[in-house]
Amino acid sequence: MIKQILRKLPRKSQKSDSLDSAGNDSDKHASNSDDGVQCTNFGNKISSRLRVVKRVSSAVFPASIMAGVEAVEPNLSFNNVSNPQKPNLFISKLNLCCEACNSSDPDKGTAEQDLKRRTLIELVDFVSSGSAKFNEAAIAAMCKMCAINLFRVFPPKYRSNTASGEADDEEPMFDPAWSSLQLVYDLFLQFISYSSLDAKVAKKYIDQPFILRLLDLFESEDPRERDCLKTILHRIYGKFTVHRPFVRKAVSNIIYTFVFETERHNGIAELLEIFGSIISGFAVPLKEEHKMFLCRVLIPLHKPKSVGVYHQQLTYCVVQFIDKDPKLANSVITGLLKYWPVTNSQKELMFISESEEILEMISMTEFQKIMVPLFRRIACCLNSFHYQVAERAHMLWNNEHVLNLIKHNRQVIFPLIFPALERNSRNHWHQTVLNLTKNTRKMLSEIDDELTLACERKLEEENSQSNEASEKRKLTWERLELAAGFEPAAANFVPPLKPATCSVAC
């Protein structure tokens, strides 16, 4: 009787139930209910909910971003869908490119790679056509796809740096997966360079962690990848002004680690090339932060042995700073003298060339502050037994601007240079250096013959005084030897040993 009454009562609606409770209730109704139509309707309701869950879980974004996004078959072409459906198709294709290829089945893996490659080519063509419109969901999907395909950990490096610091003898290593990586880089570059891209929305996904992972990729040994990264990072720096201080700080930290810890990094040249264009855009007068970047980051980069790999880009950055503020030439020359090589002739040639470029831009006032230590070092280079170093140092006199600086300060510079030229003319082994020394001495005489003669007389006096001091030392040693010879016994006397005493009573 009670069961018949309960059956006539209205049943509770299932619309507010969760998916799990709905599934449990369906089991109960399937076993207890006599109404087969109601069970069928409830099964349809569950299957529709499962389709919704599958569509949302297959997306890579939060539900708030995916609101109103309908799933589109990724194998469709952009030409076969309407314009309102193209953003959804764009997202579907990006999600397809996020999937990893199956490596267990070679045939299936090759088919998946071909499909992924065709999809990436289609995406690149779609973005480059200029008809794409990126909403927040598309921006998030693009950043996720790039992160999955590009961000990776590189294997440890086993190749050591060469003694001269140059890697010309080592062939570059090329990534075997570059054909796929290149398409991802091309797509991301087109995306970053898109004129209608909303930077305020994109900066939520191209954030500081994303930029740090992007900077880690500069460790790649493939020069093609580093070249793409260079262009992408430069576009990010230009488009996202809010990230500019962070990018400068992150690159500074990479260089600190390279200079003071590891001396191993593949992308220093590319990073400096980016900063070359950034420095050229600095406003005048320079901020204190930018001057500190020169003193703490760029100048210490002259220290590593591998400076030859990136010296051209480093010199360009330094010259850009001096062009903005000529007073910085003093700090740069002082830093060069601090890190000037002693035994590395190839590095010394680079330093001489960089010094010449700086001297072409330096003012007379700043030159007079550093001319004494600089030309003491140049005098040592003139006397170098490595003929290329000596030859390059002599070539400084062929530069009109450098020669003009020397002429105006000859009273200080001639006495520093003349002794080195005199030693070369007497002792150097290479004929080319001897000829250059003869020409330089003739040039000094033409500039100021009286001062040159005075330097020559002073050098002769110093040589005579040095010879006299040498003779005095020699006589002093002879007297000491004679004095030691008159008392051979005292000189060779060795005190006798004391006899051993027994400390134990017999």
Image (cartoon, helix red, strand yellow):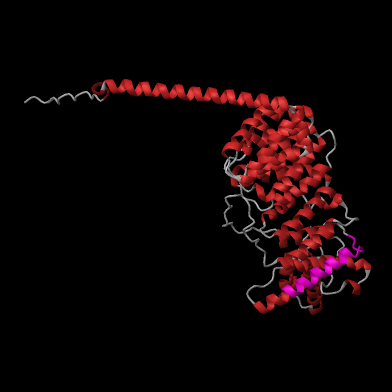
Q: Tell me, yes or no, whether the highlighted magenta stretch contains residue 182.
A: no
Above or below residue 296? Residue 408 is above
Residue 119 lies in the magenta-colored region: yes
Specify the quadrant that holds the N terminus.
Answer: bottom right
Front-most of residues 471 and 189? 471
Q: Vertical placement of 149 versus 449: above or below?
A: below
Q: Nearer the viewer, residue 306 or 232?
A: 306
Q: Is residue 288 something one can see in this rendering?
A: no
Quadrant assignment, res 315: top right
Residue in the image at 85% along x and 35% along y: 284
Q: Position of residue 244 (x, y in %)?
A: 79, 44
Asked which quadrant contains residue 463, the reply is: top right
- How many dots with numbers? 0
Magenta extent: 113-133
Residue at 28 percent across and 20 percent down: it is 486
Instruction: Report x, y in % for residue 253.
Output: 68, 43
Seen from the viewer's position, the closer of residues 106 and 465 is 465
* Vertical placement of residue 219 versus 298, above or below: below
In the picture, measured across the screen, residue 173 lies left or right of residue 15, that is left
| Displayed quadrant of residue 483 | top left
Q: Is residue 348 left or right of residue 487?
A: right
Q: Position of residue 334 (x, y in %)?
A: 68, 33
Q: Can residue 430 be seen at all in this image of the molecule?
A: yes
Lateral position of residue 469 relative to residue 81, left or right: left
Q: Quadrant of the C terminus?
A: top left
Q: What's the magenta bit mostly, secondary-structure-wise?
A: helix
Residue nearest the viewer, comparing 461 with 505: 461
Query: How far across and down, in percent of the image, does residue 76 sit?
Result: 85, 74
